[in-house]
Amino acid sequence: MGRWLRRLLVALCAVVALVVLIPVVGLAYGFLTTSDPRIAPPPAARSEISDTLRRDIPDYARGEESTFLTYPEWAIVYTAREYADFVRERFPSRFPYWAYAGRFWQDYALMIRASSAYPFNFSNHLMLVVIGTSNTIELAVQSLYENTAGRVSEAAALWKPVPEDGYQAQVAADYAAFLDQVPWYRFDYAAARAGLWAVEPAGGLAALRSWERKLGFGAADTVKQGYAALIASGLSATSDPALLDIHVWAAGPVAGAVAGEPDTRIERDLGTDGTVFVTKRYQVFTQMIPRLIGKGVRFVEIGGNRLVFLTVLADADIAAPEGARAVLSYALPAQPAVRRLGFAVEAGRLHEVLPALAAAGARLEHVYDY
């Protein structure tokens, strides 16, 4: 009995050591394979109005470093999007899992450097280490599985997709869209598993792949469902609810421009100094920004800050337009013909920078709203 207990303890220590080693090795890789973007905070531009808004409006201001530290979280969302696009037409065994695992740590290392002039945000960094480690483990396990059992079942189906492949591709697309506004741990993995098991399996030898998909992804959904429940329970017990709104100070015809926007309201009319409005964060706000610019709105502060990080997608590298500073540029691992470019932009220059990027062929991906 003592021998088995020792073996169990050794195994547990090995697992703990591996988990601890992942972020250490990951960040070492990230720092060694990226350069320092050297982003400095803009000169202090706080006004009496800004100080008043910070004092009078709860949650008006967020830490400016978060515009950078939010990006690695979204990098995981982009992995889900690019995976969904990939498996729509190709087998998941061909997806570059390890490239995406490494890309997270490169992105995180870049953002550590980009935010180095700001106070250290312990909670943000702790969260990024945890989700980065979890993401790396998930990608590693999926790569191993798809390149063993997945490859065998592909051959059994004569390298033709079975109904379960189509179902899983749709689940991947639904999951990627879900992440635009809602945390991953709120996804209904039980419903996804039930739908998978309800799919009529292929006939003949291809049935081997059908059942491999059902058993493999059904088990993965069960594990994720349990892990998600633990995360949700832990967060509800130890953390404040995520702030889902963003306060924006803008100038121009703000009231008329936001009148038709859902979940948006005017918070304070500042007369000739502009207007403060409240809207939903995340992708909703990103999609709103070009519409407001098109209606003559000019931004002053977003989340109480005057610097914002944003990313665009383009078919080639694009030089930073006036008013923007380049932070990152790389080809998507699953779509090498497409590049992701990141820029730090002063909020007051967004109405100039975004049209300039669009004119150069860039497609706005996300504005990281703290």
Image: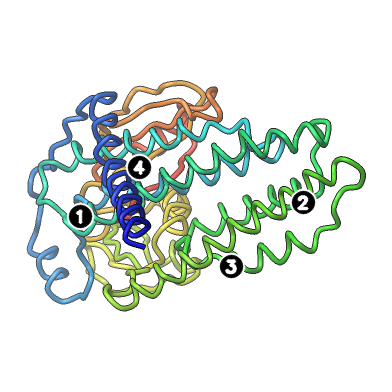
Badge 3 amino acid: Asp
Badge 4 amino acid: Leu
| 60 on left or right of 204 | left
Alpha carbons under labels 4 and 2: distance apart: 43 Å
* Percent of width and height locating residue 326: 28, 29
Alpha carbons under labels 3 and 2: distance apart: 22 Å
Tell me which label, 4 or 2, sits earlier in the chain.
2
Label 4 sits on a secondary structure element that is: strand
| 41 on left or right of 89 | left
Badge 1 amino acid: Asn
* Percent of width and height locating residue 103: 39, 34
Residue found 31% across the figure and 41% down from its top:
22
In the rendered image, which quarter contains the C terminus?
A: bottom left
Label 2 sits on a secondary structure element that is: helix
Tell me which label, 3 or 4, sits earlier in the chain.
3
362 or 86: nearer the viewer: 86
In the rendered image, which quarter contains the N terminus?
A: bottom left
Discs 1/3, front: 3
Alpha carbons under labels 3 and 4: distance apart: 30 Å
Residue under label 1, please give it.
305
Discs 2/1, front: 2
Discs 4/2, front: 2
Tell me which label, 2 or 1, sits earlier in the chain.
2
Residue under label 2, please give it.
211
Label 3 sits on a secondary structure element that is: loop
Residue under label 3, please give it.
188
Badge 2 amino acid: Trp
Tell me which label, 1 or 3, sits earlier in the chain.
3
Q: How is the image coloured?
A: rainbow
Residue under label 4, please give it.
310
Alpha carbons under labels 4 and 1: distance apart: 14 Å
